[in-house]
Amino acid sequence: MNRRKPANDTGAGRLRLLGGKWRGRVIAAPDDRDIRPTAQRTRESLFNRLLHAFADQGFSLTGAHVVDVCAGSGALGLEALSRGAAHVTFVEQAPAALDLLQRNITALNAEERTRIVRADARSLPRNATPYDLALIDPPYGTGLVEPILTALAGPNWLRTGALVTVETAADETFAAPSAYAVIDRRVTGQTAITVLQRL
């Protein structure tokens, strides 16, 4: 059974972007919470780390090309755009999530800096240009992390040295495929964020 966490601190059906160009802007979140956006506290912690902690690994969010996998409402990818990423590709397959994602992109006039790929994240289509950062937030407890990481290790999805963030429940574990090195793991409440680097 998928364990869900509180969606946001703004109220049902709304999410607030936390930093950058769109700081304070409210985007749509699901009223029924079948789609589980990353909680505000976790998003804040994650993006503070991405902005300041990984320069030694050759990463900068400014100008980065990002893929948001299991994108749901798009909150992670849109937060990345707000904070300086150049472009975000959203990977999602659920019809309700795709509708919500498109509405949020349109509300921010972000169509020129985004792309939606309707696909199963375990079996990704061919990709032309590799990404600098992947944000992965699958449903908790479903065993999807390892097959998604394996799919992203395929041709042209991640450049050598790219960062990958994986959100799971705090008590959930996964084995990183050999194409990655785990470089950081932080627990915030009931949520863990693991950061890996593409080798």
Image: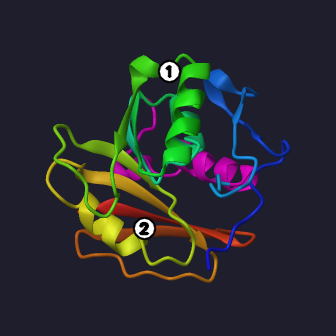
Name the residue located 49 percent from the left edge and 46 percent from the top edge. 95
Tell me: 129 left or right of 108. Answer: left
Which circle marks residue 183 in the picture?
Answer: 2
Name the residue located 52 percent from the left edge and 51 percent from the top edge. 53
Which circle marks residue 110 in the picture?
Answer: 1
In this rendering, the answer to whether 152 lies above or below 169 is above
- The kind of residue tagged 2 is Ile
In this rendering, the answer to whether 84 lies above or below 112 is below
User: Quadrant of the image for the N terminus?
Assistant: bottom right
- The kind of residue tagged 1 is Ala
Provide residue 6's location: percent of width, then percent of height: 78, 59
Tell me: 49 left or right of 133. Answer: right
Q: Nearest the camera: 90 or 189?
A: 90
Tell me: 174 left or right of 180. Answer: right
User: Quadrant of the image for the C terminus?
Assistant: bottom left
Dot 1: element = loop
Residue 42 sits inside the magenta stretch: yes
Name the residue located 52 percent from the left edge and 59 percent from the top edge. 137
Residue 49 sits inside the magenta stretch: yes
Segment colored magenta = 39-62
Tell me the distance, in whole angstroms, between the alpha carbons under discs 1 and 2.
31 Å
Provide residue 162's location: percent of width, then percent of height: 31, 51
In this rendering, the answer to whether 176 lies above or below 117 is below
Q: Identify the residue at the far front of this view.
A: 95
Dot 2: element = strand
The answer to whether residue 68 is seen in the rendering is yes
